[in-house]
Amino acid sequence: MIAGGLVANIAVMMRRALVFWMILMVPALPADAADALMAAGRIEFARTGGSCSGVLVTPGVVATAAHCVPDTRGGVGATGIAFRTAPPAAPVRVAKAYAHPLYDPDAPRIDWRYRFDLGLLVLADPDYGADLGTVPVGDDAMPGETLFLVSWRKSDGAQPRQRACPVLSIGLEGLVTLGCDVKSGESGAPLFRKTDEGAIELVAIISSRGALLDQPIAQASNLRLRLPPMLDLARRAGSP
């Protein structure tokens, strides 16, 4: 019994050490990630004073987490919600909000609920962000690679902040599990990849946080398959 318990404890320690090693071995962030920073921004809620993070995916359209906005099924007006990129850009009103059709905040299965935790905000100004260009959507995140997360909490000051997040090979199926500690206000934050050619791609959106072997982790939803149908939905619904 003692030997069995010792083996189990050693196995737990080895798994914990592996998670720590993956996080500590993250390389420095790419110096040219400023382009991604320009597309990232903050969603502000006048009624509660709270905030989430988001990213422009086309001019006038922002991707974020579905749980960051009100009941958005079918596209509803979004009273009292605004989006802003880093200064000198001014905040712009959100006209409509949408959630992924399969998002269900009351789903009993956590993995199903978070897997489709993706929202889309249509801004009142359809040209907002047109001068920033568009960051292309890349392939799904792969275990072992490093993505970098760009978020903008109110406590971050005048600019979004960025940091590297290793993609772990463990966690809930269908979700991107990251060795990153995320806080309130970082829901909806984009995750970017720097390709071998030096280009920047948008990969996923932060949906939730948790812990693995006492190590903070984050979970995110890949965009490659989930974002295009939502953009089509917003286009069919028309302009604000």
Image (cartoon, grey):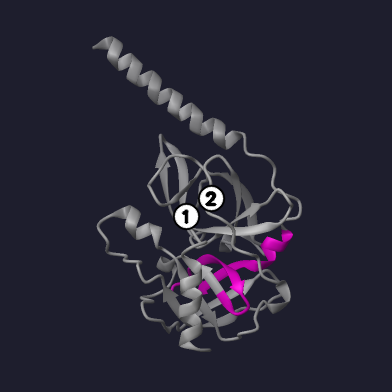
Compared to residue 210, the image places residue 48 above or below, namely below
Is 211 included in the stretch rendered in magenta? no
Residue at 51% of width from left, 83% of height from top? 235
Instruction: Give residue 220's mark.
Output: 1
Provide the secondary structure element on which disc 2 rests. Answer: loop
Q: Are marks 1 and 2 in contact (CB under 8 Å)?
A: yes
Q: Amino acid at mark 1?
A: Ala
Q: Is residue 228 in view from this perspective?
A: yes
Compared to residue 186, the image places residue 42 above or below, namely below
Q: Describe residue 97's horizontal placement relative to residue 34 as left or right.
A: left
For label 2, count other residues whose C-alpha is less than 10 Å away and answer few (under 14), some (14-19) or many (20+).
many
Residue at 37% of width from left, 81% of height from top? 74
Q: Describe residue 55's horizontal placement relative to residue 97 as left or right.
A: right
Q: Amino acid at mark 2?
A: Ala
Query: Which residue does the numbered mark 2 point to in the structure image?
Result: 141
The location of residue 157, given as percent across then percent down, is: 64, 62
Q: Which residues are magenta?
A: 34-61
Q: Is residue 240 in view from this perspective?
A: no
Q: Describe residue 223's horizontal placement relative to residue 214 as left or right.
A: right
The location of residue 187, given as percent across then percent down, is: 48, 60
Furthest-right residue in view? 31
Residue at 65% of width from left, 80% of height from top? 128
Is 53 included in the stretch rendered in magenta? yes
Location of residue 53 by image quarter: bottom right
